């Protein structure tokens, strides 16, 4: 009963400028935000979670559920992100704007560094288009159980369907993971390394003096661990 009560839904999306922050959201109801498109996105996510027949009570978005002004909170969140998505009851994906027709292969969501772990780690995932309509009209509660969506996803990512459905860090070789990472982009280069921490089962979050060194330091740690 307790575990069911605390089931939570995670949000996966592409950032679009000044997203609502922890400070902004904690001071008001999410259903009464300023009339801004990015606030509308957050409100639609919360309404989708609220109206789900599973009766979820908790929703989490990286934009406003991490107090980034507290360094220890931010660093712990980066280290924990992979597991948070993995342990979620559901991850809701809002596909990015600008791709017409809307397909997984040509969507901007597939190009971002952070969304790689948000695709691989959850056991249950559901895709929505920009109008908050279910992708391909597929009404299954979990799109990882949708043969045609998973077939399309496997072709887009070039990873076997069974690995996408039930991923673990041991499912792919280091080379295969790096190949996936090489197709992803981030606004801050350091985030490419941060987004790979869970995929490589690393708990390393060094103090990067130079963001250019971030990925190199992570790879050094991975290589040393493989030798041990």
Image (cartoon, rainbow, N blue to C red):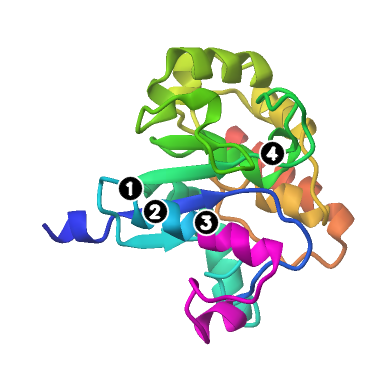
- Report how far apart the C-alphas of labels 2 and 4 lie in the structure: 20 Å
Residue numbers of the magenta segment: 22-43
Q: Earlier in the sequence, mark 4 or mark 1?
A: 1
Residue with the most extreme bottom position = 27
Count neighbours of disc 1 (C-alpha within 10 A) and say few if under 14, some if 14 to 19, many if 20 or more: few
Q: Which residue corresponds to mark 2? A: 49
Label 3 to label 4, Cα distance in Å? Answer: 18 Å
Q: Is 73 situated left or right of 69 in this image?
A: left
Residue found at x 72% / y 49% = 193
Which residue has dot 1 on it? Answer: 52
Name which of mark 1 and mark 3 comes first in the sequence. Answer: 3
Q: Are marks 2 and 1 in contact (CB under 8 Å)?
A: yes
Q: Which residue is mark 3?
A: 44
Specify the label residue 109 is tagged with. Answer: 4
* Image quarter (top left, top right, bottom left or bottom right) of the N terminus: bottom left
Which mark's residue is nearer the viewer, 2 or 4?
Answer: 2
**40 part of magenta stretch:** yes
10 Å crowding of disc 2: few (<14), some (14-19), many (20+): many
């Amino acid at each position: 009963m307790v575990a069911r009560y605390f089931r939570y839904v995670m949000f996966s999306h592409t950032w679009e400028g000044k997203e609502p922050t922890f400070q902004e959201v904690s001071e008001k109801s999410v259903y009464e935000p300023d009339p801004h498109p990015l606030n509308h996105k957050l409100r639609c996510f919360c309404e989708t979670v609220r109206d789900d027949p599973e009766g979820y009570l908790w929703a989490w978005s990286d934009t406003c559920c991490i107090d980034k002004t507290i360094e220890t909170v931010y660093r712990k969140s980066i280290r924990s992100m992979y597991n948070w998505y993995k342990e979620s009851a559901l991850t809701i994906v809002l596909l990015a704007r600008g791709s017409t027709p809307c397909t997984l292969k040509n969507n901007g969501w597939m190009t971002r560094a952070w969304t790689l772990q948000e695709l691989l780690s959850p056991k249950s995932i559901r895709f929505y288009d920009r109008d908050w309509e279910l992708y391909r009209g597929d009404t299954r509660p979990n799109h990882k159980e949708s043969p045609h969506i998973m077939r399309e996803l496997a072709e887009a990512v070039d990873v076997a369907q069974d690995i996408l459905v039930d991923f673990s860090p041991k499912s792919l070789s280091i080379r295969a993971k790096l190949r996936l990472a090489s197709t992803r982009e981030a606004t801050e280069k350091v985030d490419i390394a941060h987004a790979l921490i869970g995929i490589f089962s690393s708990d390393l979050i060094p103090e990067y003096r130079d963001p250019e060194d971030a990925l190199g330091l992570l790879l050094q740690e991975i290589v040393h661990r493989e030798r041990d």
